[in-house]
Amino acid sequence: MSSVRVFDPAMCCSSGVCGPAVDPRLARFAADLAWLESQGVSVQRFNLSKQPAAFAQDAAVKAALEARGEAALPLINVNGDVKSVGTYPSRDELAAWAGVSAPTATAS
């Protein structure tokens, strides 16, 4: 089973999807992670403001933060390899990295 670990910048909650002005990128990404979990992928998400120890304990995350500061976040780690730094990847990218088939778009 593939494992995806997401190290988010400091946010108000675990997904950043709350409050009156929700960032659509965060809503899409939260849905993409839920989809990955439905495909059997283990997903863990860490929030810098709520779980700083997780950032300090991961050598790759710590090095990225030292080199780029918070611009390194979000950082996506798949099966122990850093796959994305400073941006939220697409569902297709997540699927490819995790080794699952992305759903095909359908016309409506």
Image (cartoon, grey):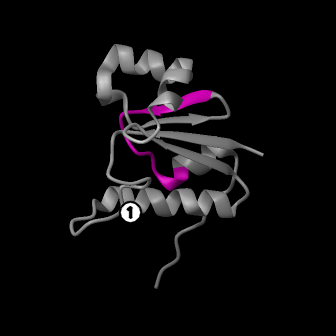
Snapshot quadrant of residue 52: top left
Residue 55 percent location from the top left of the image: 48, 28
Residue found at x 70% / y 60%? 39
Q: Residue furthest left?
A: 21
Q: Looking at this view, is 101 or 8 the one in front?
A: 8
Q: Residue furthest right?
A: 1
- 36 w.r.t. 8: above or below: below
Residue 19 percent location from the top left of the image: 26, 66
Residue found at x 33% / y 47%? 11
Count neighbours of disc 1 (C-alpha within 10 A) and say few if under 14, some if 14 to 19, many if 20 or more.
Answer: some
Q: Would residue 53 be visible to someone looking at this image?
A: yes
Q: Is residue 9 left or right of residue 30?
A: left
Q: Is residue 86 magenta?
A: yes
Q: Looking at this view, is 58 or 28 the one in front?
A: 58
Residue 94 percent location from the top left of the image: 56, 47
Q: Mark 1 falls on what kind of element?
A: helix
Q: Which residue is mark 1?
A: 27
Q: Looking at this view, is 81 or 12 the one in front?
A: 12
**Which residues lie in the magenta part?**
81-92
Residue found at x 65% / y 58%? 37
- 64 w.r.t. 104: above or below: above
Q: Would residue 102 be visible to someone looking at this image?
A: no
Residue found at x 42% / y 20%? 64
Q: Is residue 69 left or right of residue 58?
A: left
Q: Is residue 12 left or right of residue 88?
A: left
Q: Is residue 71 magenta?
A: no
Count numbered badges in the picture.
Answer: 1
Q: Is residue 91 left or right of residue 26?
A: right
- 36 w.r.t. 81: above or below: below
Give the amino acid at mark 1.
Ala
Residue 33 percent location from the top left of the image: 54, 56
